[in-house]
């Protein structure tokens, strides 16, 4: 069923050009290893007030890695509200959050449609959980706030031929960016929060050279041969609390040590992102 | 959103519930022990038109049906380099054995399509999408599941899982849906392949010859084959950890987690990370693998707060006092007055929750044992 | 009479009764010698400066970010391949012939080439406003009327200006000397036809489809000008990868620089791209540089018709101002808008101005004279945008 409210293009299916056969690609790709130390996050650029007509807005850009063709994350977030709920909605003693996360059509390797797909809805739910813990919701009864994150560019290697599985790890990086940028936009909108919340990702990776898997923070899937597990954490540093935890992977249960360490590193990543966030807000929001 | 549906409890009731659940040991409204599941009725093979199906009915009246349908689908060659190149290279080094561990033989996550239907919710509702994502995430987490759907280099099974809640969502349906999905997948059988190699597949008509998607060895002494994961809902109130919370209990949760675990099968497993658990290969204790954790936004954050007497004008708080009083009331909790939790959970609490789920001989074990007992027909 | 007793601050007044406020700033009272200006401080015919960045997105084949004042729009162009087998009403004869005729003539006539673009829908522009770029555009609803209108306007302008040459979107395949043995019947048939022509040359196997996606990050009036500038900048930035048609896979395969290529299948004139990452690319040829220029007409009388008391001067409201590049608050006050698309690029920049399109909506103020005069304004705007694009 085509969407008649948009311009849909040709009836026949279009195919993105496929890449050259594997052999030549691996030579060309030469997936470089990680260029940063294992516990360093990439440089971030954060700016508030990019959309003047919104109550609050922010733009986040995460540095591209050294290799060409690997894009950094670019996110823009707008916050509209708090505003009164429509008359038809039932009484709420708290502010109602609605979060939307949408990839731009040109954000990823494959072109995205305009309708939100399940993974975007899923990200929205994660974001909601992360922010709801931070917002002091009972200060605005009977009101709602819309938080909209547009992913202008996803964190993906354009060239990698190993598409399998990578995408799901990309979601984690995207989510951590969404949390950080939304937190900045909330602060820009002047909505009371218990603390600034930032996202952080840690992953258990195994590289060809290494004997045993190691834990890195802020991983770029294309820089590693294999990601065994990863977690994305939204963390409130001054309260030492986690508002959202998303872990995915495959870990033996007998070794909870590994899991604990992973979460610890995730918190570390989040705390680092938070420092950037606070610095940025200190300059602009004041 | 299914987890944050409106809870019709007054602040006083919430405060009472919270207090009762914080006791040691906690007193749950339905008298269960903290780690006890609700009793359930399960059956499989209820839908003759499917490859596998199951129905589970919880004692509180929630009921779910899962149907699994499999179709043969041509592996897209143009999509991505992997599939295409693999075919073009021709099978030389890694040959026919579908059990060999070639990383790029891994199935595509597109091969599984899981839809969740909750009555009263749109199918594009964020909560429904969240549930579906959680269930399929656990299924696909180890990458081994999609491999089971591999037929040959040109074809694969496409699995459609339809997860239906057929009662109103009286409690957060995640554990129910996960258990039902687990059972349905256990019961799923795929026709036996008769063709060989990369030719167009054709199958044995005889349903009796069909093979289980998760084959189970008859003798339980040998290493059991893999089983689909289960997702457990666990929450913390005060110092207590409570499994399978009912709706009212979830309404006062400090933190709620959905934890997906699977049985660890062959210790020779896929990753280097598993090396160190061979020593735990005692036949009795099954070792578990942690596949995914998600924070469930507890509905407690949306509950109405109570008003302490000090700030209540009916109890003599004057209006002049009210403003500063209200501020302090916001800052500090008053004993016995319900306040929606604010902020997140301490990392230690979360770690404890996960630890509890993964415990040897713990709840996860119990559940898997119980599901073992279900007749797969 | 409201003005002397004004005790509100300016922004409050502007919000409470925007129309008189704008009127007062545009027509200052005799005692004050302030120059006529708009509430945003611009002169009536002054547009906001344009800033353009290109090539900032790595997944798109061409991209641009355009900022004029507080309106920010991002455009990404991405090419995908449409095999002719997927075109339901494909007419191979027409295009084949055109190829043989020599392209010059076909281009002059324009008919066939344009038909190709339009019939096969090779350009797909879409505008997304639901990013919270302004309070009234929130996600979760179908595209608003404005978004639909803008998409359609960009679509029709792309076709009418013939910015993209369909020739550059064709993908050719030269069959190896021995006849391909594993072609499907349709292709065989086409090959047969070709053989009839006594021509064993390259055959047209697919087209590039350009998906032109626009995302508004921030919207403060005049979305069309910004969107169109972004489309043009992104198209000029577009570099399509060189592809080789693989008849076995029925797909276009990217060519690496490292691989010596025997079959030539590049689009149009194959300029060796300054490839980002070892994949050969070819800049998309873009004809001309049409620039849109929008103005709104601000009437002294409100739309309602009741005359405003704000002006103490005796002249009762027939005056009007043409506000170039209106912002959001001005747009809400103006009922009549004009958009003129001009292109002065023919003949090396200083050449004659070609008016590509004129659109006028609402109102009766703009007559023939004013529109003619407006062409001069549009010309000035063209130079500004052209400079920003360099």
Image (cartoon, coloured by chain):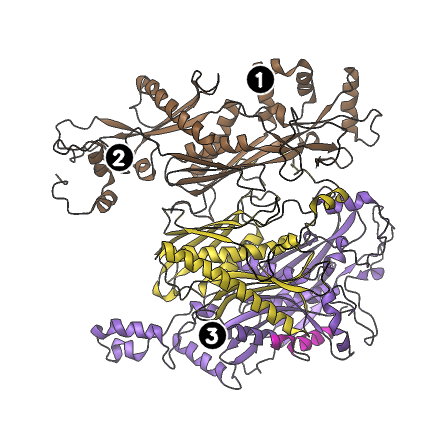
B197 vs B375, left or right, is right
For disc 2, the marked residue is: C38
For disc 1, the marked residue is: C111
Q: Quadrant of residue C248?
A: top right
Q: CA distance from mark 2 to mark 1?
A: 45 Å
Q: Position of residue B97 (x, y in %)?
A: 85, 56
| Mark before the other along the chain sequence, 2 or 1 | 2
- A45 vs C4: above or below: below
User: Both on one chain, marks 3 and 1?
Assistant: no
The colour assigned to chain C within the rendered structure: brown
Q: Residues within 10 Å of mark 3 (few under 14, many from 20)?
A: many
Q: Is C54 contained in the magenta span?
A: no
What's the chain of the residue with tag 2?
Answer: C
Residues drawn in magenta? B355-377
Q: CA distance from mark 3 to mark 1?
A: 71 Å
Q: Are marks 3 and 1 in contact (CB under 8 Å)?
A: no
- C88 vs C201: above or below: below
Q: Position of residue A205 (x, y in %)?
A: 66, 61
Tell me which chain appears purple.
Answer: B
For disc 3, the marked residue is: B252
Q: Residues within 10 Å of mark 1 (few under 14, many from 20)?
A: few
Q: Determine whether the residue tagged by mark 2 lies in a helix, strand or loop.
A: loop
Tell me which chain appears yellow.
Answer: A
């Amino acid at each position: 069923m085509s969407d008649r409210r948009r311009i849909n293009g040709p009836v026949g299916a279009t195919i993105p050009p496929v890449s050259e056969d594997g052999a030549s690609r691996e030579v060309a790709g030469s997936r470089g290893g990680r260029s940063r130390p294992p516990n360093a996050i990439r440089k971030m650029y954060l700016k508030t007030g990019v959309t003047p007509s919104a109550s609050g807005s922010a733009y986040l850009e995460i540095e591209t890695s050294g290799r060409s063709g690997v894009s950094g994350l670019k996110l823009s977030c707008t916050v509209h509200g708090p505003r009164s709920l429509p008359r038809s909605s039932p009484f709420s003693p708290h502010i109602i959050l609605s979060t939307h996360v949408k990839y731009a059509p040109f954000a990823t390797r494959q072109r995205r449609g305009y309708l939100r797909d399940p993974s975007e809805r899923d990200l929205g739910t994660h974001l909601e959980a992360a922010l709801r813990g931070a917002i002091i919701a009972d200060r605005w009864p009977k009101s709602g706030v819309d938080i909209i994150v547009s992913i202008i560019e996803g964190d993906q290697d354009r060239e990698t031929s190993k598409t399998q599985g990578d995408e799901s790890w990309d979601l984690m990086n995207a989510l951590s960016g969404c949390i950080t940028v939304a937190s900045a936009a909330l602060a820009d909108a002047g909505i009371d929060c218990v603390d600034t919340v930032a996202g952080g990702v840690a992953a258990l990776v195994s590289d060809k050279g290494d004997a045993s898997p190691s834990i890195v923070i802020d991983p770029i899937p294309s820089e590693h041969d294999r990601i065994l597990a990863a977690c994305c954490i939204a963390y409130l540093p001054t309260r030492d609390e986690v508002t959202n935890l998303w872990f995915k992977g495959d870990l033996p249960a007998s070794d909870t040590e590994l899991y604990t360490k992973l979460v610890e590193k995730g918190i570390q990543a989040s705390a680092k992102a938070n420092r950037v966030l606070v610095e940025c807000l200190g300059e602009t929001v004041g | 959103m299914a987890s944050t549906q409106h809870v019709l409890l007054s602040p006083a009731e919430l405060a009472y519930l919270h207090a009762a659940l914080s006791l040691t040991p906690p007193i749950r409204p339905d008298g269960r022990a903290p780690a006890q599941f609700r009793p359930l009725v399960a059956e499989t093979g209820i839908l003759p038109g499917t490859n596998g199906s199951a129905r589970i009915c919880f004692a509180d009246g929630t009921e779910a049906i899962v149907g699994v349908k499999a179709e043969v689908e041509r592996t897209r060659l143009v999509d991505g380099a992997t599939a295409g190149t693999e075919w073009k290279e021709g099978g030389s080094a890694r040959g026919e054995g579908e059990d060999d561990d070639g990383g790029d033989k891994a199935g595509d996550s597109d091969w599984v399509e899981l839809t969740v239907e909750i009555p009263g919710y749109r199918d594009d509702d964020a909560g429904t999408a969240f549930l579906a994502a959680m269930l399929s995430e656990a299924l696909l987490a180890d990458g081994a599941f999609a491999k089971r759907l591999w037929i040959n280099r040109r074809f694969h099974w496409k699995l459609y899982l339809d997860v239906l809640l057929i009662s109103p969502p009286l409690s957060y349906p995640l554990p129910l849906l996960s258990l039902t999905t687990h059972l349905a997948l256990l019961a799923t059988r795929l026709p036996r392949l008769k063709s060989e190699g990369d030719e167009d597949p054709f199958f044995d008509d005889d349903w009796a010859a069909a093979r289980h998607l998760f084959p189970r060895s008859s003798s339980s002494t040998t290493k059991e084959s893999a089983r689909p994961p289960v997702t457990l809902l666990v929450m913390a109130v005060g110092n207590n950890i409570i499994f399978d919370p009912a709706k009212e209990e979830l309404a006062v949760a400090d933190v709620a987690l959905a934890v997906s675990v699977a049985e660890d099968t062959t210790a020779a497993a896929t990753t280097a990370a598993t090396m160190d658990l061979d020593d735990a290969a005692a036949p009795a204790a099954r070792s578990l693998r942690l596949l995914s954790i998600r924070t469930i936004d507890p509905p407690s954050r949306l509950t109405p707060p109570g008003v302490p007497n000090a700030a209540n004008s009916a109890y003599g708080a004057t209006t002049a006092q009210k403003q500063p009083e209200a501020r302090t009331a916001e800052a500090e909790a008053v004993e016995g007055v319900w306040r929606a939790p604010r902020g997140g959970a301490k990392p230690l609490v979360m770690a404890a929750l996960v630890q509890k789920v993964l415990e040897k001989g713990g709840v996860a074990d119990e559940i898997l044992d119980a599901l073992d007992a279900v007749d797969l027909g | 009479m409201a003005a002397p007793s004004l005790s509100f601050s300016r922004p409050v007044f502007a919000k409470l009764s925007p129309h008189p406020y704008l009127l007062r700033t545009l027509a200052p009272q005799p005692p004050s010698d302030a120059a006529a200006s708009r509430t945003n401080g611009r002169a009536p015919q002054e547009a906001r400066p344009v800033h353009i960045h290109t090539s900032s997105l790595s997944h798109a084949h061409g991209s641009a970010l355009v900022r004029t004042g507080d309106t920010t729009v991002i455009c990404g162009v991405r090419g995908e391949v449409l095999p002719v087998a997927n075109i339901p009403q494909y007419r191979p004869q027409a295009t084949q012939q055109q190829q043989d005729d020599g392209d010059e003539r076909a281009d002059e006539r324009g008919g066939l080439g344009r038909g190709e673009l339009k019939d096969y829908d090779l350009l797909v522009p879409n505008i997304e406003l639901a990013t919270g770029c302004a309070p009234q555009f929130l996600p979760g609803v179908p595209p608003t009327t404005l978004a639909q209108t803008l998409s359609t306007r960009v679509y029709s302008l792309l076709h009418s200006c013939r910015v993209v040459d369909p020739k550059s979107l064709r993908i050719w395949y030269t069959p190896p000397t021995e006849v391909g043995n594993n072609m499907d019947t349709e292709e065989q048939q086409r090959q047969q036809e070709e053989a009839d022509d006594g021509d064993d040359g390259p055959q047209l196997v697919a087209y590039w489809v350009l998906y032109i996606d626009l995302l508004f990050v921030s919207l403060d009036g005049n979305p069309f000008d910004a969107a169109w500038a972004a489309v043009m900048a992104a198209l000029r930035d577009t570099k399509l990868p060189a592809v080789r048609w693989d008849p076995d896979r029925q797909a276009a395969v990217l060519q690496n620089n490292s691989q010596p290529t025997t079959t030539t299948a590049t689009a149009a004139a194959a300029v060796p791209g300054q490839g980002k990452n070892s994949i050969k690319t070819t800049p998309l040829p873009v004809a001309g540089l049409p620039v849109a220029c929008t103005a709104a007409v601000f009437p002294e009388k409100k739309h309602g018709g009741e005359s405003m008391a704000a002006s103490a001067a005796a002249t009762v409201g027939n005056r009007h101002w043409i506000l170039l590049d209106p912002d959001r608050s001005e747009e809400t006050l103006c009922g009549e808008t004009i958009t003129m698309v001009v292109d002065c690029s023919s003949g090396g920049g200083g050449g004659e101005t070609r008016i590509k399109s004129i659109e006028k909506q609402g109102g009766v103020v703009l007559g023939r004279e004013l529109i003619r005069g407006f062409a001069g304004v549009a010309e000035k705007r063209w130079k500004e945008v052209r400079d920003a694009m360099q």
